[in-house]
Amino acid sequence: MNKVIVITSGKGGVGKTTTAINLGAAINHFGGDTLIIDANLTTPNLGLHLNSPEVPINLNQVMQNKADVFEAVYEHESGIKIMPSSLSIKELKKINPEKIKEFKKDFKKISDYIIVDSAAGLGQEAIAAIDLADELIIITNPEMPAITDALKTIKLAEQMKKPVLGVIMTRVKRNKIEMRPEEVKEMLEVPILGMIPEDLDVQKSLSLKDAVIHTHPKSKPARAYKEIAANILQIDYSSEEDEENIFKRVLKKLGLKS
């Protein structure tokens, strides 16, 4: 069954785009046919993150009925399909964000799993993306301002009758300052799908313009995203078995293994 999963947050800068890319990459890693759509029309970053900042046809042109949906799809070397948005301010002024839901059936013809990166906050763009969803995943950090904004997003989803699959906590440091998972779960009253650790490998993957799933497949954040994807796909996956052993790590540090 084809499914539109919208990645959203009540607050910017929590790792929403990074999660959309890596969750899509992880689903694709396990054989799931995946399309990632950049519905953050104001500040689109999907193309930048995957080394496709400018493309001939994008989502904006589709929403203006200037191009067919299928023409705006591009395939990453990993096999992920992506649909970037335009970086042009002029294009933005011509777009009605609510129009995106008119193309939901077409999106579902392209892939089995459609991951949508929405705008941050609870403005018109974010609401339009939420309205497109079959299910929502909320991205937050383990700190009170982000959790409070996540709660607002969950309440809005309830009003719009959109099911929340759960919450992904990103930039987790596991120190005494940040909120604990059980506190977050009690406050938000939705499942915690996974916890993505704060890790330099994520920043390295951004500089390499690719998903950490591809650039550092054995890293902690990559394995955390794989766990979430495996749960969504309802397949078995062992993060411990996938972990790079100490011997290989030593060889890498010595420059004896790539």
Image (cartoon, rainbow, N blue to C red):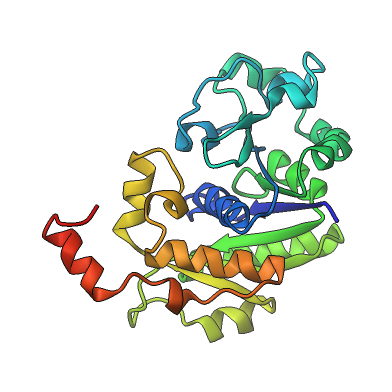
- Taking the spot 56% from the left edge, 51% from the top edge, the residue there is 25
Q: Is 35 on the left or on the right of 87, as rendered? A: right
Give the answer, above or below, for where 56 lies relative to 153.
above
Which residue appears farthest toward the front when viewing the image? 256
Instruction: Tell me residue 29's x, y (percent).
Output: 57, 55
Q: Number of numbered discs present?
A: 0
- Taking the spot 35% from the left edge, 39% from the top edge, the residue there is 208
- Taking the spot 62% from the left edge, 84% from the top edge, the residue there is 186
Instruction: Tell me residue 213's x, y (percent).
Output: 46, 54
Which residue appears farthest toward the left when viewing the image? 254
Instruction: Kindly indicate the quadrant of the structure image that contains residue 108.
Output: top right
| Near-viewer residue (102 or 206) | 206
Instruction: Tell me residue 68's x, y (percent).
Output: 80, 20
- Taking the spot 15% from the left edge, 61% from the top edge, the residue there is 253
Give the answer, above or below, for where 124 lies relative to 156.
above
| Near-viewer residue (51 or 130) | 51
The N terminus appears in which quarter of the rendering?
A: bottom right
| Near-viewer residue (42 or 171) | 171
Instruction: Tell me residue 212's x, y (percent).
Output: 42, 52
Give the answer, above or below, for where 203 lies relative to 87.
below
Q: Is 47 on the left or on the right of 245, as rendered? A: right
| Near-viewer residue (13 or 166) | 166
